[in-house]
Amino acid sequence: MKIEEQLLTHLFNCRRVDLYAGKRTLTDEQMQVFSHMKSRLSQGEPLQYILGAVDFMGISLCVDERVLIPRPETEELVVCAIDLLKQGNGSQIRYVLDLGTGSGNIAIAIAKNVLNSFVTTVDISPAAIDLATLNAHENKLNDKIRFICQDMKIFLKEEIFRNKYDLVISNPPYIPTAQIEQLPCDVKKEPFIALDGGEDGLNFYREIISAAHLLLEDNGCLLLEIGEYQAEDIKKIVEASGKYQECSFRKDNAGKQRITIIKR
């Protein structure tokens, strides 16, 4: 669907086909909103922020400048997580930890698709936690998700003495700091904190991999989304830790290694 068509279907609250099935005319008020939307687009603002929503695995989520926009690649990460969580254990509760939850897309999709799941989420941004909580409430899943606003590093150090999880999952910031200025204009409108992975883009992976083995149940899994050129670096970090049985990768629909499965 073309961008202008997406703006119009949003304004008219209709399907694309309805735009052409009968003559539709913008009211003066709608015309003003439409012009404002196009102005925001021309300034590089992401379409999803302008529409205020995004579809993620068939789930409608509110998004704005507080959070990273969920991508299709992350849907593949979640599908992998769902497959792993549904293996064995019958109706036993499956406990999941989602690190860096952002809009809550990963947690909400897992909670919706794995009926016997309970997800704990962590994010350093109070604004992101507010939006994720709203999204969980709107999708009637707030009773299956716990939201924690805390620095991930601090949480990981404290949580190893409290709880264990069947799955730890994260799509952390992984873009090297120096490369952020080279990103497309609309991507640079997203929160810097949700993009910046440190000097080499691997800061969060080091933190997560060093702690996750202490948080996982026996035979539990750590599931990570990674940058398309980071597989070898991730493998080296896992091997250097000496705490895991296996590290494997799955390719996304574009044939790039974007999903890491690390078994305790």
Image: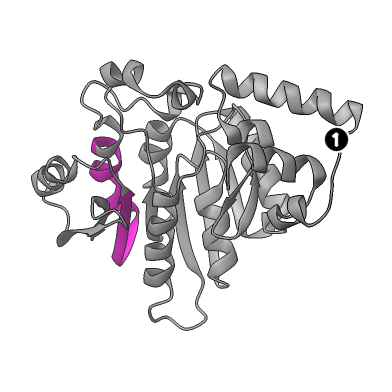
Q: Residue at x 37, y 70 (%)?
A: 84
Left or right, 140 with respect to 132, comes to: right
Q: Residue at x 42, y 80 (%)?
A: 89
Helix, strand or loop status at disc 1: loop
Q: Quadrant of residue 244?
A: bottom left
Q: Nearer the viewer, residue 225 or 263?
A: 225
Find residue 47 and report its horizontal and vertical position in percent: 59, 33
Count the marks: 1
What residue is shown with label 1? 26
Q: Nearer the viewer, residue 234 or 119?
A: 234
Q: Nearer the viewer, residue 128 or 63?
A: 63
- The verdict on residue 79 being magenta is no
Q: Compared to 92, does 127 lie above or below?
A: above
Q: Compared to 24, does 166 lie above or below?
A: below
Type of the residue with mark 1: Leu
Q: Nearer the viewer, residue 260 or 97?
A: 260
Q: Compared to 96, does 231 lie above or below?
A: above
Q: Quadrant of the C terminus?
A: bottom left
Q: Compared to 15, does 193 lie above or below?
A: above
Q: Does the image show residue 164? A: no
- The verdict on residue 216 being magenta is yes
Q: Residue at x 58, y 72 (%)?
A: 115
Find residue 103 and report its horizontal and vertical position in percent: 57, 41
Q: Residue at x 37, y 38 (%)?
A: 172
Label 1 neighbour load within 10 Å: few <14, some 14-19, many 20+? few
Q: Does the image show residue 12? A: yes
Find residue 202 and report its horizontal and vertical position in percent: 24, 32
Q: Quadrant of residue 193?
A: top left
Colour style of the rendered protein structure = one colour
Q: What segment is highlighted magenta in the picture?
A: 206-224
